[in-house]
Image (spheres, rainbow, N blue to C red):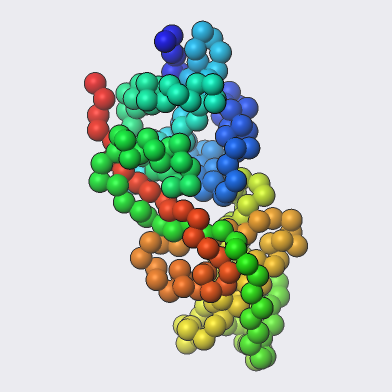
Amino acid sequence: MQLEITKATLDEIQELRKLLLAEVSFQFVYNKCHGAGWADVYRFTMAGSPVGHGALWGKEKRENRDTVFEFYLLKPFRHLGDKIFPKFLKKSGAMFLNCQSNDTFLTKLLFEYGKNINAEAILFEDSFQTEFKIDGTVFRKSELQDGGDSEYVLMHNGEVVASGGYVWNYNYPYIDLYYEVKPGYRQRGFGSLITQELKKEAYRLNRVPSARCNINNIASKATLLKAGMRICGYMLIGKIPKFK
C-alpha cells in the first residue's frame, strides 16, 4: 500500500469534505472547526490520487491540535480504514478522538482504538411538531429595548421571559438552536414553548433545526424532548494510545 499522509490546506480537501457531508444526514457539529480556523487537516493519497482526509483540533486548547474529529475515506478504500487510521494517528501525533455516535465509521474506530470513552453531550434532531400555548405569550424577533444578544424573545404579559436563537456555522441545511429561560420563569413550560417556536421559525428560514445539551443537563434534555426533539446521538471523547 503506497500511502502518503501529508498536511494540507482546507482547499485541498474541500472536495473530499463535500463527499463526507453529502453522505451524512445529520448535523455535523465539528463542521464549525474548519470555518473558524481551529483545525489542521491531512490528505491521504495512494499512487498520487486522493483517497481520504483527516482533521484535528485541540481538546482543551484549540491551538494544540491533539484531537481527531474527522476521518474520511472514499468508499472504495474504506476497507483499508484499519491500516490507514493508525498511520494517520502516528503522523499527526493525536492523543484523543472526538466524534458523534451517529458518525458510525469514526465511532467504530473510536471503540477499536480508544480508551476511557465518555459521552460529553446529547445530540437532538427534530421528530414531531408540538402546539403548546400559554395565555399572554408572544414570540417575536428581539428588539434593542429587550437587552441581550439573542435573535428572538418570548414575551409573557409584556415581559421577556425567555430568549433564544440559532448557531449557523454547521453543515447546510442544519442549524443549532439555543434558548434560555429567565430565573423565576423556569419549569412553567416557557422553555418548551420557545423551542417549539424556534423550530417553526427554522423551517421558515429553510433550515433544519437541531440541538444539543450537556450529558448531565437533565432539565434541558427534558425540555427538548417535550418540544418534539429526539435523541439522535452523542458527542463522544476517548483517549488514543501512542503509535510507534
The answer to whether residue 219 is visible is yes
Q: Report how many numbered discs are placed on residues in the image.
A: 0
Location of residue 11 (image quadrant): top right
Q: Is residue 176 left or right of residue 80?
A: right
Q: Is residue 218 left or right of residue 53?
A: left
Which residue is drawn at the image coordinates 33% and 32% (left, top)?
A: 94
Residue 159 on image: x %, y %? 62, 87
Residue 34 on image: x %, y %? 54, 38
- Considering the image in quadrants, where does the N terminus appear? top left
Residue 203 on image: x %, y %? 71, 61
Which residue is drawn at the image coordinates 44% and 58% (left, top)?
A: 122
161 or 5, which is in the foreground?
A: 5
| Above or below for 174 versus 67 | below
Which residue is drawn at the image coordinates 30% and 47% (left, top)?
A: 117
Which residue is drawn at the image coordinates 55% and 18% (left, top)?
A: 50
Residue 15 on image: x %, y %? 63, 27
210 or 35, which is in the foreground?
A: 210
| Above or below for 73 versus 27 | above
- Considering the image in quadrants, where does the C terminus appear? top left
80 or 154, which is in the foreground?
A: 80
